[in-house]
Image (tube, rainbow, N blue to C red):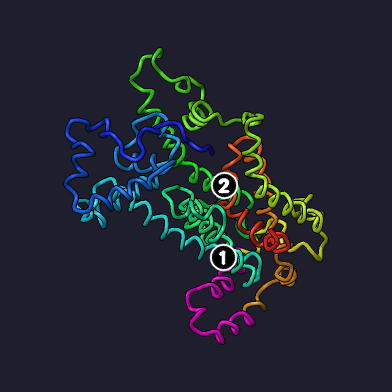
Amino acid sequence: MADPLEPLRHLRPHQPNCLSNNSSQPNVDLQQQHVLLPSLGSAIESSIVWDSVFFVRIAQCGYEYEQTYAFFPLLPLCISLLSRTVLAPLVPVIGQRAVLGLSGYVINNIAFVFVAVYLYRLSVVILKDHEAALRASILFCFNPASIFYSSIYSETLYALFSVGGLYHLISGKDVIAVLWFASLDFQGPMESSMLVVVGGALRCIFIFVPFVAFQAYGYNNICLGHLPNSMSPWCKARVPLLYNYIQSHYWGVGFLRYFQVKQLPNFLLASPILSLTLCSIVHYAKLKPEIFFSLGFCAPPERKDSAAVFFSLQKTLPTVGVLLLNGTENRNLKARKQVINDGTSLLPEEYKLSAKQGYLSAAVLPCILHLGFMAATAFFVMHVQVATRFFIFQPSSVLVCLVYNEISWYW
Protein backbone atom coordinates (compact mmCIF):
# COMPACT_ATOMS: atom_id res chain seq x y z
CA MET A 1 0.00 0.00 0.00
CA ALA A 2 3.02 2.24 0.09
CA ASP A 3 6.17 2.83 -1.90
CA PRO A 4 8.99 1.42 0.27
CA LEU A 5 11.84 3.60 -0.89
CA GLU A 6 13.88 4.19 2.24
CA PRO A 7 14.47 0.84 3.98
CA LEU A 8 17.24 -1.32 2.51
CA ARG A 9 18.18 1.41 0.06
CA HIS A 10 21.82 0.44 0.52
CA LEU A 11 21.10 -3.00 -0.94
CA ARG A 12 20.94 -1.75 -4.56
CA PRO A 13 22.43 -2.97 -6.83
CA HIS A 14 24.57 -5.38 -4.72
CA GLN A 15 23.46 -6.90 -1.45
CA PRO A 16 25.57 -7.99 1.52
CA ASN A 17 25.67 -11.61 2.59
CA CYS A 18 22.59 -13.14 4.19
CA LEU A 19 22.56 -12.46 7.91
CA SER A 20 21.56 -16.03 8.67
CA ASN A 21 24.43 -17.51 6.68
CA ASN A 22 27.13 -14.88 6.87
CA SER A 23 30.03 -17.20 7.45
CA SER A 24 29.43 -19.83 4.79
CA GLN A 25 28.21 -17.64 1.95
CA PRO A 26 30.97 -16.26 -0.31
CA ASN A 27 31.28 -12.55 -0.79
CA VAL A 28 29.04 -11.15 -3.53
CA ASP A 29 31.94 -9.55 -5.35
CA LEU A 30 33.89 -12.83 -5.25
CA GLN A 31 30.92 -14.66 -6.74
CA GLN A 32 30.73 -12.09 -9.48
CA GLN A 33 34.36 -12.74 -10.48
CA HIS A 34 33.77 -16.47 -11.08
CA VAL A 35 30.71 -16.29 -13.35
CA LEU A 36 31.12 -16.76 -17.09
CA LEU A 37 29.17 -13.63 -18.10
CA PRO A 38 29.66 -11.10 -15.30
CA SER A 39 28.53 -8.16 -17.43
CA LEU A 40 25.19 -9.81 -18.18
CA GLY A 41 24.77 -10.73 -14.53
CA SER A 42 25.54 -7.16 -13.47
CA ALA A 43 23.00 -5.80 -15.96
CA ILE A 44 20.26 -8.04 -14.55
CA GLU A 45 21.20 -7.15 -10.98
CA SER A 46 21.17 -3.44 -11.78
CA SER A 47 17.56 -3.76 -12.94
CA ILE A 48 16.52 -5.05 -9.50
CA VAL A 49 15.34 -1.81 -7.89
CA TRP A 50 12.63 -0.47 -5.58
CA ASP A 51 10.27 -3.20 -4.33
CA SER A 52 12.10 -5.78 -6.44
CA VAL A 53 15.01 -5.54 -3.98
CA PHE A 54 12.81 -6.87 -1.19
CA PHE A 55 11.36 -9.78 -3.17
CA VAL A 56 14.74 -10.94 -4.43
CA ARG A 57 16.32 -10.51 -1.00
CA ILE A 58 13.57 -12.55 0.64
CA ALA A 59 13.89 -15.27 -2.01
CA GLN A 60 17.63 -15.41 -1.33
CA CYS A 61 17.86 -14.93 2.43
CA GLY A 62 14.37 -15.24 3.89
CA TYR A 63 12.77 -12.66 6.19
CA GLU A 64 15.69 -10.93 7.91
CA TYR A 65 14.29 -7.50 8.80
CA GLU A 66 10.99 -6.45 10.32
CA GLN A 67 10.28 -4.25 7.28
CA THR A 68 10.42 -7.21 4.91
CA TYR A 69 7.28 -8.71 6.42
CA ALA A 70 5.29 -6.13 4.47
CA PHE A 71 5.99 -8.30 1.40
CA PHE A 72 4.06 -11.53 1.26
CA PRO A 73 5.86 -14.80 0.51
CA LEU A 74 4.19 -16.17 -2.64
CA LEU A 75 6.36 -14.33 -5.17
CA PRO A 76 9.63 -14.94 -3.25
CA LEU A 77 8.74 -18.63 -2.95
CA CYS A 78 8.09 -18.89 -6.69
CA ILE A 79 11.33 -17.06 -7.46
CA SER A 80 13.32 -19.33 -5.14
CA LEU A 81 11.73 -22.48 -6.58
CA LEU A 82 12.37 -21.51 -10.21
CA SER A 83 15.94 -20.40 -9.51
CA ARG A 84 16.73 -23.72 -7.80
CA THR A 85 15.21 -25.90 -10.52
CA VAL A 86 14.72 -24.80 -14.12
CA LEU A 87 17.11 -21.85 -14.06
CA ALA A 88 19.69 -23.40 -11.70
CA PRO A 89 22.13 -24.19 -14.57
CA LEU A 90 22.45 -20.43 -15.18
CA VAL A 91 23.97 -19.73 -11.76
CA PRO A 92 27.57 -20.37 -12.93
CA VAL A 93 26.89 -18.23 -15.99
CA ILE A 94 25.43 -15.03 -14.52
CA GLY A 95 25.48 -15.53 -10.74
CA GLN A 96 22.94 -16.46 -8.08
CA ARG A 97 21.33 -13.07 -7.56
CA ALA A 98 21.01 -12.47 -11.30
CA VAL A 99 19.26 -15.84 -11.63
CA LEU A 100 16.88 -14.84 -8.85
CA GLY A 101 16.09 -11.61 -10.69
CA LEU A 102 15.65 -13.44 -13.99
CA SER A 103 13.30 -15.91 -12.28
CA GLY A 104 11.15 -13.02 -11.10
CA TYR A 105 10.94 -11.58 -14.60
CA VAL A 106 10.02 -14.95 -16.12
CA ILE A 107 7.30 -15.62 -13.54
CA ASN A 108 5.65 -12.22 -13.86
CA ASN A 109 5.72 -12.09 -17.65
CA ILE A 110 4.17 -15.55 -17.97
CA ALA A 111 1.57 -14.65 -15.33
CA PHE A 112 0.82 -11.43 -17.21
CA VAL A 113 -0.16 -13.38 -20.33
CA PHE A 114 -2.59 -15.50 -18.31
CA VAL A 115 -4.05 -12.39 -16.65
CA ALA A 116 -4.89 -10.92 -20.06
CA VAL A 117 -6.54 -14.18 -21.14
CA TYR A 118 -8.63 -14.47 -17.98
CA LEU A 119 -9.55 -10.80 -18.17
CA TYR A 120 -10.88 -11.24 -21.69
CA ARG A 121 -12.94 -14.27 -20.68
CA LEU A 122 -14.29 -12.58 -17.56
CA SER A 123 -15.18 -9.41 -19.51
CA VAL A 124 -17.08 -11.44 -22.11
CA VAL A 125 -19.07 -13.16 -19.39
CA ILE A 126 -20.07 -9.97 -17.55
CA LEU A 127 -20.34 -7.47 -20.42
CA LYS A 128 -21.63 -9.85 -23.12
CA ASP A 129 -19.58 -7.92 -25.64
CA HIS A 130 -16.55 -9.50 -27.33
CA GLU A 131 -15.33 -6.19 -28.75
CA ALA A 132 -15.49 -4.42 -25.39
CA ALA A 133 -13.74 -7.37 -23.78
CA LEU A 134 -10.96 -7.20 -26.35
CA ARG A 135 -10.55 -3.45 -25.83
CA ALA A 136 -10.41 -4.00 -22.08
CA SER A 137 -7.67 -6.57 -22.50
CA ILE A 138 -5.67 -4.29 -24.81
CA LEU A 139 -5.97 -1.32 -22.47
CA PHE A 140 -5.05 -3.61 -19.60
CA CYS A 141 -1.84 -4.59 -21.39
CA PHE A 142 -0.91 -1.08 -22.49
CA ASN A 143 -1.49 1.36 -19.65
CA PRO A 144 0.69 3.59 -17.44
CA ALA A 145 1.07 0.81 -14.88
CA SER A 146 1.86 -2.02 -17.30
CA ILE A 147 5.57 -1.76 -16.53
CA PHE A 148 4.85 -3.39 -13.18
CA TYR A 149 3.61 -6.51 -14.97
CA SER A 150 7.12 -7.09 -16.28
CA SER A 151 8.92 -6.04 -13.10
CA ILE A 152 9.59 -8.09 -10.01
CA TYR A 153 6.47 -6.87 -8.23
CA SER A 154 3.65 -8.90 -6.72
CA GLU A 155 0.91 -7.06 -8.63
CA THR A 156 0.97 -9.49 -11.54
CA LEU A 157 0.33 -12.56 -9.41
CA TYR A 158 -2.30 -10.62 -7.48
CA ALA A 159 -4.09 -9.73 -10.71
CA LEU A 160 -3.86 -13.31 -11.96
CA PHE A 161 -5.42 -14.86 -8.87
CA SER A 162 -8.05 -12.10 -8.55
CA VAL A 163 -9.24 -12.12 -12.17
CA GLY A 164 -8.85 -15.88 -12.53
CA GLY A 165 -10.64 -16.47 -9.26
CA LEU A 166 -13.58 -14.30 -10.29
CA TYR A 167 -13.82 -16.10 -13.60
CA HIS A 168 -13.90 -19.51 -11.92
CA LEU A 169 -16.39 -18.19 -9.35
CA ILE A 170 -19.00 -17.15 -11.91
CA SER A 171 -18.27 -20.30 -13.90
CA GLY A 172 -19.55 -22.37 -10.98
CA LYS A 173 -16.14 -23.83 -10.01
CA ASP A 174 -16.43 -23.06 -6.32
CA VAL A 175 -13.42 -24.92 -4.98
CA ILE A 176 -11.10 -23.62 -7.68
CA ALA A 177 -12.40 -20.09 -7.11
CA VAL A 178 -11.61 -20.26 -3.41
CA LEU A 179 -8.15 -21.59 -4.12
CA TRP A 180 -7.66 -18.72 -6.57
CA PHE A 181 -8.28 -16.18 -3.86
CA ALA A 182 -11.85 -15.66 -4.95
CA SER A 183 -14.78 -14.18 -3.09
CA LEU A 184 -17.49 -16.27 -1.45
CA ASP A 185 -19.96 -17.86 -3.84
CA PHE A 186 -23.68 -18.24 -3.80
CA GLN A 187 -25.67 -21.40 -4.48
CA GLY A 188 -28.99 -21.44 -6.26
CA PRO A 189 -32.30 -20.33 -4.73
CA MET A 190 -33.26 -23.97 -4.12
CA GLU A 191 -30.42 -24.36 -1.62
CA SER A 192 -30.93 -23.78 2.09
CA SER A 193 -30.17 -20.26 3.21
CA MET A 194 -28.22 -21.60 6.16
CA LEU A 195 -26.06 -23.72 3.86
CA VAL A 196 -25.37 -20.66 1.73
CA VAL A 197 -24.31 -18.61 4.76
CA VAL A 198 -22.20 -21.36 6.33
CA GLY A 199 -20.59 -22.28 3.03
CA GLY A 200 -19.79 -18.67 2.25
CA ALA A 201 -18.37 -18.09 5.74
CA LEU A 202 -16.14 -21.16 5.51
CA ARG A 203 -14.82 -20.06 2.13
CA CYS A 204 -14.12 -16.58 3.44
CA ILE A 205 -12.23 -18.03 6.39
CA PHE A 206 -10.23 -20.24 4.07
CA ILE A 207 -9.27 -17.23 1.95
CA PHE A 208 -7.94 -15.34 4.99
CA VAL A 209 -6.02 -18.31 6.42
CA PRO A 210 -2.78 -17.54 4.47
CA PHE A 211 -2.76 -13.95 5.74
CA VAL A 212 -3.36 -15.00 9.34
CA ALA A 213 -0.73 -17.73 9.05
CA PHE A 214 1.84 -15.23 7.77
CA GLN A 215 1.11 -12.86 10.65
CA ALA A 216 1.57 -15.77 13.06
CA TYR A 217 4.87 -16.60 11.34
CA GLY A 218 6.08 -13.04 11.85
CA TYR A 219 4.95 -13.04 15.48
CA ASN A 220 6.84 -16.27 16.11
CA ASN A 221 10.05 -14.93 14.56
CA ILE A 222 10.04 -11.42 16.00
CA CYS A 223 8.14 -11.55 19.28
CA LEU A 224 8.51 -14.97 20.87
CA GLY A 225 11.61 -15.54 22.96
CA HIS A 226 12.29 -11.84 23.54
CA LEU A 227 12.04 -9.84 26.73
CA PRO A 228 9.06 -7.43 26.94
CA ASN A 229 11.37 -4.41 26.91
CA SER A 230 13.01 -5.50 23.65
CA MET A 231 9.80 -6.33 21.81
CA SER A 232 8.33 -4.17 19.07
CA PRO A 233 5.17 -2.30 20.15
CA TRP A 234 2.91 -4.38 17.91
CA CYS A 235 3.91 -7.57 19.77
CA LYS A 236 2.18 -6.24 22.90
CA ALA A 237 -1.09 -5.34 21.16
CA ARG A 238 -4.27 -7.22 22.00
CA VAL A 239 -4.49 -8.33 18.37
CA PRO A 240 -0.89 -8.25 17.10
CA LEU A 241 -0.92 -7.42 13.39
CA LEU A 242 2.55 -7.07 11.98
CA TYR A 243 1.41 -5.84 8.55
CA ASN A 244 -0.55 -2.88 9.92
CA TYR A 245 2.31 -1.86 12.19
CA ILE A 246 4.90 -1.97 9.40
CA GLN A 247 2.77 0.08 7.01
CA SER A 248 2.08 2.69 9.68
CA HIS A 249 5.49 2.83 11.39
CA TYR A 250 7.87 2.60 8.44
CA TRP A 251 5.87 4.15 5.61
CA GLY A 252 3.34 6.40 7.31
CA VAL A 253 0.24 4.72 5.89
CA GLY A 254 -2.96 5.67 7.68
CA PHE A 255 -6.25 7.53 7.44
CA LEU A 256 -5.63 11.12 6.24
CA ARG A 257 -1.92 10.86 7.13
CA TYR A 258 -0.95 11.66 3.54
CA PHE A 259 -2.97 14.89 3.47
CA GLN A 260 0.00 17.25 3.54
CA VAL A 261 0.86 20.27 1.44
CA LYS A 262 4.13 18.69 0.31
CA GLN A 263 2.19 15.72 -1.10
CA LEU A 264 0.12 17.83 -3.52
CA PRO A 265 2.27 16.73 -6.52
CA ASN A 266 1.50 13.11 -5.69
CA PHE A 267 -2.23 13.84 -5.58
CA LEU A 268 -1.90 15.47 -9.00
CA LEU A 269 -0.07 12.39 -10.23
CA ALA A 270 -2.97 10.20 -9.12
CA SER A 271 -5.70 12.55 -10.35
CA PRO A 272 -6.17 10.98 -13.84
CA ILE A 273 -6.96 7.48 -12.61
CA LEU A 274 -8.97 8.79 -9.64
CA SER A 275 -11.00 11.05 -11.95
CA LEU A 276 -11.63 8.19 -14.35
CA THR A 277 -12.76 6.00 -11.48
CA LEU A 278 -15.10 8.67 -10.09
CA CYS A 279 -16.61 9.34 -13.52
CA SER A 280 -17.26 5.64 -14.03
CA ILE A 281 -19.12 5.36 -10.72
CA VAL A 282 -21.11 8.57 -11.22
CA HIS A 283 -22.00 7.62 -14.78
CA TYR A 284 -23.37 4.26 -13.66
CA ALA A 285 -25.24 5.77 -10.71
CA LYS A 286 -26.91 8.43 -12.89
CA LEU A 287 -28.08 6.01 -15.57
CA LYS A 288 -29.03 3.16 -13.23
CA PRO A 289 -30.01 4.83 -9.93
CA GLU A 290 -32.60 2.16 -9.05
CA ILE A 291 -29.93 -0.53 -9.25
CA PHE A 292 -27.08 1.46 -7.73
CA PHE A 293 -28.81 2.90 -4.66
CA SER A 294 -30.73 -0.29 -3.85
CA LEU A 295 -27.64 -2.48 -4.37
CA GLY A 296 -29.59 -4.31 -7.06
CA PHE A 297 -32.40 -5.55 -4.81
CA CYS A 298 -35.09 -2.98 -5.62
CA ALA A 299 -34.77 -2.64 -9.39
CA PRO A 300 -37.98 -2.58 -11.49
CA PRO A 301 -39.19 -6.07 -12.46
CA GLU A 302 -38.26 -5.62 -16.11
CA ARG A 303 -34.73 -4.62 -15.13
CA LYS A 304 -34.10 -6.85 -12.16
CA ASP A 305 -31.68 -9.01 -14.08
CA SER A 306 -29.77 -9.90 -10.93
CA ALA A 307 -30.45 -8.91 -7.35
CA ALA A 308 -27.55 -10.96 -6.12
CA VAL A 309 -25.79 -10.90 -9.44
CA PHE A 310 -23.90 -14.16 -9.42
CA PHE A 311 -26.97 -16.32 -8.75
CA SER A 312 -27.97 -16.47 -12.40
CA LEU A 313 -24.44 -16.14 -13.72
CA GLN A 314 -23.32 -19.20 -11.84
CA LYS A 315 -26.18 -21.36 -13.06
CA THR A 316 -26.08 -20.39 -16.73
CA LEU A 317 -22.35 -20.19 -17.30
CA PRO A 318 -21.50 -23.87 -16.90
CA THR A 319 -23.79 -24.63 -19.87
CA VAL A 320 -23.29 -21.48 -21.93
CA GLY A 321 -20.39 -19.26 -20.92
CA VAL A 322 -17.82 -22.00 -20.55
CA LEU A 323 -18.74 -23.34 -23.99
CA LEU A 324 -18.26 -19.90 -25.44
CA LEU A 325 -14.91 -19.32 -23.78
CA ASN A 326 -13.10 -22.64 -24.06
CA GLY A 327 -10.08 -23.17 -26.24
CA THR A 328 -12.08 -24.48 -29.22
CA GLU A 329 -13.76 -21.17 -30.02
CA ASN A 330 -10.92 -20.09 -32.32
CA ARG A 331 -10.84 -23.37 -34.21
CA ASN A 332 -14.16 -23.05 -35.88
CA LEU A 333 -15.89 -19.67 -36.10
CA LYS A 334 -19.00 -21.16 -37.65
CA ALA A 335 -19.38 -23.66 -34.84
CA ARG A 336 -18.89 -20.91 -32.28
CA LYS A 337 -21.72 -18.85 -33.74
CA GLN A 338 -23.96 -21.91 -33.56
CA VAL A 339 -23.08 -22.39 -29.89
CA ILE A 340 -23.89 -18.75 -29.20
CA ASN A 341 -27.26 -18.97 -30.91
CA ASP A 342 -28.16 -22.21 -29.19
CA GLY A 343 -26.80 -21.18 -25.80
CA THR A 344 -28.70 -17.89 -25.65
CA SER A 345 -31.98 -19.76 -25.50
CA LEU A 346 -30.90 -21.29 -22.19
CA LEU A 347 -30.75 -17.89 -20.49
CA PRO A 348 -33.74 -16.45 -18.60
CA GLU A 349 -35.58 -13.64 -20.38
CA GLU A 350 -34.57 -11.09 -17.76
CA TYR A 351 -30.95 -12.12 -18.16
CA LYS A 352 -31.15 -11.72 -21.94
CA LEU A 353 -32.14 -8.11 -21.29
CA SER A 354 -29.08 -7.72 -19.10
CA ALA A 355 -26.87 -9.15 -21.82
CA LYS A 356 -27.85 -6.28 -24.10
CA GLN A 357 -27.00 -3.63 -21.57
CA GLY A 358 -23.29 -4.40 -21.27
CA TYR A 359 -21.61 -1.92 -18.96
CA LEU A 360 -24.94 -0.70 -17.54
CA SER A 361 -26.23 -4.14 -16.53
CA ALA A 362 -26.64 -5.13 -12.89
CA ALA A 363 -23.89 -7.70 -13.40
CA VAL A 364 -21.41 -4.80 -13.24
CA LEU A 365 -22.78 -3.49 -9.92
CA PRO A 366 -20.44 -5.52 -7.67
CA CYS A 367 -17.51 -4.13 -9.66
CA ILE A 368 -18.83 -0.58 -9.23
CA LEU A 369 -19.23 -0.99 -5.46
CA HIS A 370 -15.83 -2.60 -5.08
CA LEU A 371 -14.28 0.14 -7.18
CA GLY A 372 -15.79 2.80 -4.93
CA PHE A 373 -14.36 1.15 -1.82
CA MET A 374 -10.92 0.88 -3.44
CA ALA A 375 -11.03 4.52 -4.55
CA ALA A 376 -11.82 5.69 -1.02
CA THR A 377 -8.99 3.54 0.36
CA ALA A 378 -6.49 4.89 -2.17
CA PHE A 379 -7.46 8.53 -1.61
CA PHE A 380 -7.82 8.63 2.17
CA VAL A 381 -5.46 5.92 3.45
CA MET A 382 -2.74 4.91 0.99
CA HIS A 383 0.19 6.72 -0.53
CA VAL A 384 -1.93 8.21 -3.27
CA GLN A 385 0.76 8.11 -5.99
CA VAL A 386 0.48 4.33 -6.20
CA ALA A 387 -3.20 4.64 -7.15
CA THR A 388 -2.48 4.16 -10.85
CA ARG A 389 -1.01 0.69 -10.49
CA PHE A 390 -3.30 -0.09 -7.55
CA PHE A 391 -6.44 0.38 -9.65
CA ILE A 392 -5.15 -1.32 -12.76
CA PHE A 393 -4.59 -4.54 -10.83
CA GLN A 394 -8.11 -4.58 -9.37
CA PRO A 395 -10.60 -6.68 -11.39
CA SER A 396 -13.34 -4.15 -10.69
CA SER A 397 -11.22 -1.32 -12.08
CA VAL A 398 -10.38 -3.27 -15.19
CA LEU A 399 -13.98 -4.18 -15.91
CA VAL A 400 -15.33 -0.72 -15.21
CA CYS A 401 -12.71 1.90 -16.04
CA LEU A 402 -11.13 0.23 -19.02
CA VAL A 403 -14.40 -0.88 -20.58
CA TYR A 404 -16.08 2.44 -19.96
CA ASN A 405 -15.72 3.41 -23.60
CA GLU A 406 -17.12 6.92 -23.37
CA ILE A 407 -14.22 7.90 -21.10
CA SER A 408 -11.45 5.40 -21.77
CA TRP A 409 -11.04 6.07 -25.46
CA TYR A 410 -10.99 9.85 -25.05
CA TRP A 411 -8.79 9.82 -21.93
In the image, 251 versus 33, the foreground residue is: 33
The three-letter code of the residue at mark 1 reads Ile
- Residue 42 place in picture, x, y as percent: 29, 47
**Is the residue 148 above or below the residue 19 in the image?**
below
Callout 1: SS: helix
- Residue 178 place in picture, x, y as percent: 49, 52
Asked if one can make out residue 363 in the rendered structure from this viewpoint, the answer is: no
Q: Does residue 366 appear to the left or right of 168 in the view shown?
A: right
Q: Is residue 289 magenta?
A: no
Q: CA distance from mark 1 to mark 2?
A: 18 Å
The three-letter code of the residue at mark 2 reads Phe
Residue beneath label 1, please? 138
Callout 2: SS: helix
* Badge 1 or badge 2: first in the primary sequence: 1
Q: Which mark is residue 390?
A: 2
In the image, 259 versus 249, the foreground residue is: 259
